[in-house]
Amino acid sequence: MKKQKEHVTQGNRKTKKQKDNSQNLDFLYGNQGGYILLTEELDIILNLPKLTTEVFNVILDDRTLDKLSTGDILEKYEHFTERQLGIINKYIHGHLYDKNTLFVSDLIDCANWNNIESVTIFNFCLDTIKKRRTLPMVWSAIMYVFEHMRISQSIYVVPVLERVINNKTYYQNCQIIAAFCLFRITMNPKYLQIIKELVSIDKDLHNVLTNKMLLMDYNCNKRCFFYGNEDFI
């Protein structure tokens, strides 16, 4: 009986804490539109164990928050429900061609990290890489394509990524990540040599990127394919 009473007390405390969290979200309401979240305000949202329907709807309301603030939440929040991800899926599809390219790159990252499979997003990312859109978009697009490609699509993906490493108009860090993905897809050692050559151009900058690619979060869960061409085996 005593344990049960203590449990009720703890439950009451939790409810009080939830109310306090709700009060801390006052900054989300009453804005005229385009509100940019402060770092501490973004942290409050990212640390919430769940988003209520009301808060979730406010975040996706284009009349409330600045797009980059919405993008930050969608990219970094880790506790979306399946229902919320279904709504986010539709939201992403409706904003892929937004003029704010940083915002679009956040949407692609959100789709990637939350494993949102979409032929539309996949083809959009391939097109983004081909057309050399802004650095964040190309980077995010490469990562999404790599994570969500099927083995049958490698024949289309490999030439697009090779275009990145062979064309000097692409940023070098995009070329490095493209070469890394090509190595993971084909297991051809020539791409490792390309990575070394690109890193040597600016070691201080690119060593950070290369080390990051080799971390568990970037490397261990990636799928690995062999490209069906004798030249790559």
Image: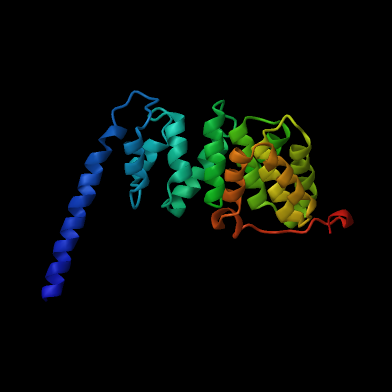
| 229, 32: nearer the viewer | 229
Residue that appears at 75% across and 31% down:
168
| 80, 177: nearer the viewer | 177
Which quarter of the picture shows residue 15?
Answer: bottom left
**Residue 211 spot, x, y in % from top left:** 59, 50
**Residue 169 spot, x, y in % from top left:** 73, 29
Any part of residue 127 in sight: yes
Asked whether, in this view, residue 87 is left or right of residue 56, the answer is right
| 224, 126: nearer the viewer | 224
Q: How is the image coloured?
A: rainbow
**Residue 174 spot, x, y in % from top left:** 66, 39
Above or below, 171 relative to 194: above
Name the residue at the bottom extreme. Answer: 1
Any part of residue 123 in sight: no
Residue that appears at 77% across and 33% down:
167
Above or below, 122 relative to 222: above
Asked whether, in this view, residue 29 is left or right of residue 155, the answer is left
**Residue 124 spot, x, y in % from top left:** 66, 38
Residue that appears at 73% across and 53% down:
183
The quarter in which the C terminus is drawn is: bottom right
